[in-house]
Amino acid sequence: RVKGDTVDVFLAYHDYIVRVIFWGDEIESIETVDPLTGVTTERLNSYRIFPANLFVTTKERIFRAIDEIQIDLGKQVEFFQSIGKPLEAKRLYERVTYDVEMIKEIGYCSGIENYSRYFDGRLPGTRPFCLLDFFPEDYLTVIDESHVTIPQIRAMYGGDHSRKLNLVEYGFRLPAAIDNRPLTFEEFEAHTPEIIFVSATPADYELEKSEGIVVDQLIRPTGLLDPPIDVRPSLNQVDDLMEEIQLRVEKNERVLVTTLTKRMAEELTDYLSQHDIRCNYIHSDVETLERVKIMDDLRSGIYDVLIGVNLLREGLDLPEVSLVAVLDADKEGFLRSHRSLTQTAGRAARNVNGKVIFYADKITDSMQTTIDETNRRREKQIKYNEQHGITPQQIIKARSSVLNKEYTVTAEARAYVEPDYYSMASEPLPEYATADDLKTKIEQTRKAMLSAAKKLEFLEAARLRD
């Protein structure tokens, strides 16, 4: 910001302003200023200002990169024109020409990482530099929850490559953009010679790579056991679940329920709420911070039951949860594989009264594998506790809010339920309503009608429609 002979520089990495005051063509003073009060906080003889981004290099390298970019631009534009794609040729020419002008003028442009191959001096198809290049040759890599982390490493390259191919094909980027990418899985393996995989449910890849060297870490300092698993028929599973929930509510304990679909989770939440059970659902459509708040509310007793699909698994540490119920456990698939079932069942392992219920009409291979593995672990844990005179003790974990501060419940533990009626105090009578009031009322009724139809409550939807 320039005012006369004063230039205010708002830094991207600090919360104060650097004010430079000129006298003609010379700098008279440099000072830091509080942006809220305008008060000078410090006077300086010199100040080093860094760019707002991390792309810093020499002018020689910039000019060399620009030459290479323009050569590749000419080749790609000529290629598009030769195959009858003038629109793509024009789009690419304008985009890259603009980026080159920005690089010439200010040293960088939006999306400059897509030109990284030119600045790095790499050959086409070679991998980019990464943090692993700075590690010594004998470093050790520890991968936690490896059964989900390893597939993500595999998928990163595939997803990025697919997206970049589309950008190149339609003339949004030069082919060099493809070389700004994550490592392929083979490249990652080559850079991580020594790995420890940590997982309660290792996948086949980890077992093969470890060549049979597997260490069981089954003994907990608290002496807690893996929860026993009870298999019950799916007929009347919701009614049976409600009885189990009431038993936990009386003991001031919490319940996790996993369903197969997001819609099922929402509908089960509605059904349990109608029967005065304080519950909420959590799935991928719920914002991240809202999920954290819901789990805090579960721990604090605002909710007694949390219903989810695939988020109630790894990393969820809720000592108050004493029951995990898996609905439709016999529906074989990703959500009911033996790894998913074992991870879900483990959410009840933090409570001394932990228990798992599988609602199923038959015992699938995945269920049997989970049950057998749980029994094997329980035998070892029980034997160790008996040999060392250990009595299992409940985990005590501090409860904190979203901001990670100690958290005290000041309101009565009660879930808020939206009223199913309209308040006369806030809604005018039809004979006194204005046109805007009527439009608002119509829109509210329309939304209620759509909501009822979505819940398959067609009689209610028809009533609202009429």
Image (cartoon, helix red, strand yellow):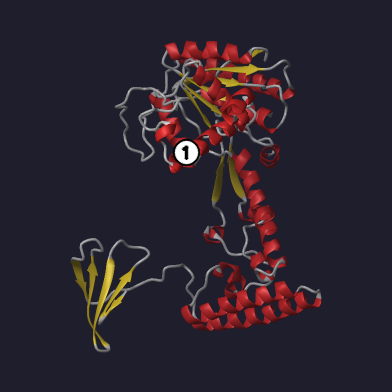
Q: Residue 445 or 107: which is nearer the viewer?
A: 445
205 left or right, relative to 326: right
- Going by the numbered disc 1, the residue's amino acid type is Leu
381 left or right, relative to 9: right
Q: Position of residue 41 (x, y in %)?
A: 19, 65
Identify which residue is drawn at 36% across, 22% down.
Answer: 413
122 left or right, relative to 144: right
Q: Residue 117 or 309: which is nearer the viewer?
A: 309
Label 1: state its secondary structure: helix
Residue 114, placed above or below residue 202: below
Q: Quadrant of the N terminus?
A: bottom left
Q: Position of residue 168 (x, y in %)?
A: 69, 67
Provide the residue designation for mark 1: 438
Q: Quadrant of the C terminus?
A: top right
Q: Position of residue 239 (x, y in %)?
A: 59, 12
Report if residue 13 is visible in the image.
yes
Residue 28, placed above or below residue 273: below
Q: Position of residue 375 (x, y in %)?
A: 62, 17
Q: How many marks?
A: 1
List the single residue furthest toward the front: 431
Quarter of the figure with residue 424: top left
Identify which residue is drawn at 62% across, 24% down.
Answer: 457
Identify which residue is drawn at 21% across, 66% down.
Answer: 38
